[in-house]
Amino acid sequence: MLAAQTKGMTARSRLNEYLTSEVKRWTGSDLPPSLYHYTSGAGINAIASGKVLRAYNLGQVNDFVEGRFAASIMRANIDRSYALEADTAALALFASMRRQLVNVELSQVFVLSFTTNGDEPGMWRLYADRGRGFSFSIRLHTALTWAAEAHDGIILKCNYGEAALQDFCAASLVKVREIFLSDSQVGLDPNPDEYAQMFLENSAWLAPAFKPEIWKDEREWRFLFVRPREAHKKQEDGRTFIELPLIPEGLAKQSPISAICCGPLGDYEDDILPLQKTLFDHGYGADFPIHIATSHVVRPGRKPPVFGKRA
């Protein structure tokens, strides 16, 4: 039993080392100074008052079609690898992947989306109440500490288009084949079902890093969190989420949110002033920065904001 556990851990560690190197390669060295999240007016007020962010189940996000997009490309690569494989041991590995791919379990994976653009027209309309909502910013180094260290998350920079996904699928299958055959050659007698399951479980978590080309203007980064069922909560509409404290234990007693921006159709009296009161009432200070979108339009007969447009 111990030998089997050691064998599995060794193979898993080699696979995870490779997948981690892929994540680092996608991220690159051109890092943004801040990341932004879009939400409705009700959403930002709830975040400010409750001091938590909600991450939603990967199988229930609005654009779950992206998960199917990644799975379909991976399936095609597995089928091709199976069709062309000449080694009988590797053939058993790919055959097991073909059987198991439809059963990958992601119900415990949750996603929280950010972007490098805090004032993008399409994002306002899609994710911020048709422009009446808000975006908030978190500086990148703070986001890395908050998500990866404090909340044990994975941070992924999204890749757009089929080419990047195709390259990842092909290369990752080559890697797991190499791991499987190397363990076979040293007499570990690896179980193809176990190795196939290990590969699908770990590589599936990276599916949200790939999106169709049409969404490239969103310049999205995604934070993934794995949580057991006892941590899951449900909204009235049935969507499953987890709560992530803005100020987790061990982090400096300061919100990671550095600034908030009101959308192009937000109203000063109806939207901005109530949020300012919420922020003040919950300890953010009287001068917490709220900006307005560069495309902001003051409604006829309404008061303009008392501060300048967003830089």
Image (spheres, rainbow, N blue to C red):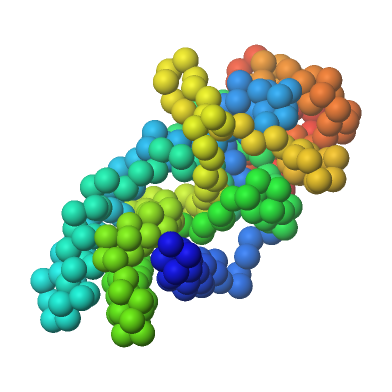
The reply, left or right, for residue 249 in relation to residue 94 is right
> Is residue 24 visible to us here?
yes
> Is residue 213 visible to us here?
no
Could you tell me which residue is drawn at 43 percent across and 18 percent down?
237
The reply, left or right, for residue 130 in relation to residue 294 is left
Tell me where residue 196 sits by quadrant.
bottom left
User: Does 116 appear above or below 270?
Assistant: below
User: Does 311 appear above or below 12?
Assistant: above
Could you tell me which residue is drawn at 56 percent across and 54 percent down?
154
Q: Residue furthest left?
A: 83
Name the foreground residue: 60 vs 309.
60
Across and down, in percent, residue 86 comes to 13, 81
Across and down, in percent, residue 310 comes to 70, 43
Could you tell me which residue is drawn at 29 percent across and 66 percent down?
191
Q: Residue furthest front?
A: 1
Across and down, in percent, residue 127 comes to 49, 34
Name the foreground residue: 154 vs 309.
154
Q: How many marks can you see?
A: 0
- Image quadrant for the N terminus? bottom left
Name the foreground residue: 29 vs 266.
29
